[in-house]
Amino acid sequence: MLDLDNVVIYVGKAKNLKKRLASYFRSNISNGKTRVLVSKICDIKIIVTSSEIDALILENDLIKHHLPKYNVLLRDDKSYPYIFISDHKHPRITSHRGPKKAKGKYFGPYPNSGAVRESLHLLQKIFPMRQCEDVYYRNRSRPCLQYQMKRCLAPCVAGKVSEDEYAQEVKLAALFLSGNSQDVLKQVVQKMEAASAQLNFESAARYRDQLTALRKVQEQQWINGDQSDIDVVGFNYDHGIACFHVLFIRNGKVLGSRSYYPKIPKDTDTDELHSAFMLQFYLNNSAGRQIPRQILHHNLELDSDAIGQVLTVEAGYKVRLHHNTRGQRAKLVAMAQRNARIGLESKLAQKGTQLQRITALEQAIDSDKKIYRMECFDISHTAGQQTVASCVVFDREGPAKSQYRKFNIEGITGGDDYAAMNQALTRRFSKATDATLIPDILFIDGGKGQLTEAEEVMKKYQDTMPKMPMLLGVAKGEGRKAGLETLFVGFTREIIDLENDNPALHLIQHIRDESHRFAITGHRARRAKVKNTSTLEHIAGVGPKRRQALIKYLGGMQELKKASSSEIAKVPGISRELAQIIFDTLNH
């Protein structure tokens, strides 16, 4: 269904097209959403498919492509993390996101990176495998701190652990992650008894500690004897907000859970909500989400058979949806339902708090208009290097993280925060023509200097922008303590004093802290990238073989920097001209 501007506003499917359209175009429509939708329809396009399964898949694809205003939209495109054991001589255990290109074994998916970090931290204590990068591992000549802490067997150093012993640890870790914890326990008991019989009490003690940790983990994670891969979906809906809570169970263990809050049009019925969530959640290929063989839910009206057929086609194996559960499975559904209710209550409380804070801010600045969008800019660098500016966006519901932006700052004097702020704001507002994407309030994290730079930029573009945001400088208080901030109004330099317990100040602190966090995250990522890049890589004519020869013959990067151009020219494959270029680059 399309509106006057030929924009797709709704996508739906129907077995009987005549009946479906007749349900929209009648005089006594009780559903408010349908009434508004019908008033906007100017054209209808039809695609005929060969089966209901094809129609469901096509509907999901069109919704993801067009993002229609009156469809339920689940905007969750983040890929899910896995635990990965590499296929090396001495395998590495680590977390992984994205395409599974590397050779090895993948375990998961986990609901979030926090669950993976916690699992890896625990596994490192139980199975002391290496987690270090391959580059670090290959260049070790003596054990690192992880070995001293008994969290790695140091396979990088000869004589510390035998090939068979390390392979056994890898095998046990893989068995444990696969859900075969009973087999792991038996093997560890056998190894402990064998070590004790050989009077190798130090090894026996290590196996004993390993056994204790394994049993503790098993008690925490074990759900039932069912070794199936199951997702349990709970649901709650109130005040126009829907919460789906998904429990991820793999091999009888709960890997974690996560709540989802899809964007829904007003007055959407729950059956449409459930169907849209199931399809969009499991058919989102970009998220790398594994479709389990069984999905438990509680909605009696959901067309479980049709959705199950679609997911079966997508997964390549039989997928079943169950709503009539008993025993242990009924308890899992009840748990998911309870978590969905708690998640919704938390979301409603958060939304109420956010609205209270925005209302207080509107009063503090004497605004007769509602605030719909706020942005905050901050600068982060280390001694003027790898400078990054952040722009975070808040709306009436809180952080709009999908609209956050980072700006890599180039071409300025190192450490010049004013120039960095000027460049970031220029790049943000030089082509700003959409009024809905221009903030009502623009916060600048800093004192009068940064605010002055923001004023200069805004003056340049005030004639091209459809509206001017209100500028507010947020200067840190004495001792950088929260609650002592000074607020400066742009252009007038009026000072706004807010009490420590004022909700408006809490909102400003939240926005300021979020921009600071986002700027530091971007700066650290950029700095890490530079750290892992050699200066030699940027010199034309110096490829991998020549880089290797330079490092090898001159004894490392530090010695290379100290070497003269004539010494560099003695390296095989390096001409005098290239040696001079290398010398000049390293000593500019």
Image (cartoon, rainbow, N blue to C red):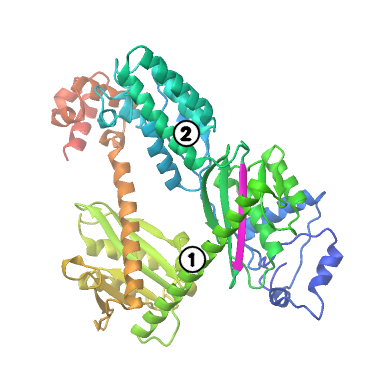
> Residue 523: x and y, percent?
30, 51
Name the kind of residue labelled 1 in the image. Ser
Q: Quadrant of the C terminus?
A: top left
Judging by the rendered image, the residue that carries numbered circle 1 is 346
- Can the viewer see residue 318 in this picture? yes
Highlighted magenta segment, given as a residue range: 230-237
- Out of 83 and 178, give the one closest to the viewer: 178
Instruction: Classify 478 as above or below 288.
Output: below
- Report if residue 517 lies within the magenta region: no
Secondary structure beneath disc 1? helix
Location of residue 264 (image quadrant): bottom right
Instruction: Classify 378 as above or below 231.
Output: below
Cα distance between the residues tagged 1 and 2: 34 Å
Judging by the rendered image, the residue that carries numbered circle 2 is 84
Name the kind of residue labelled 2 in the image. Phe
Badge 2: few (under 14), some or many (20 or more) residues near its Cα, within 10 Å? many
Q: Is residue 140 left or right of residue 46?
A: left
Instruction: Classify 21 as above or below 361.
Output: above
First along the sequence among labels 1 and 2: 2
Q: Is residue 390 left or right of residue 244?
A: left
Badge 1: few (under 14), some or many (20 or more) residues near its Cα, within 10 Å? few
From the image, state whether disc 1 or disc 2 is nearer to you: 1
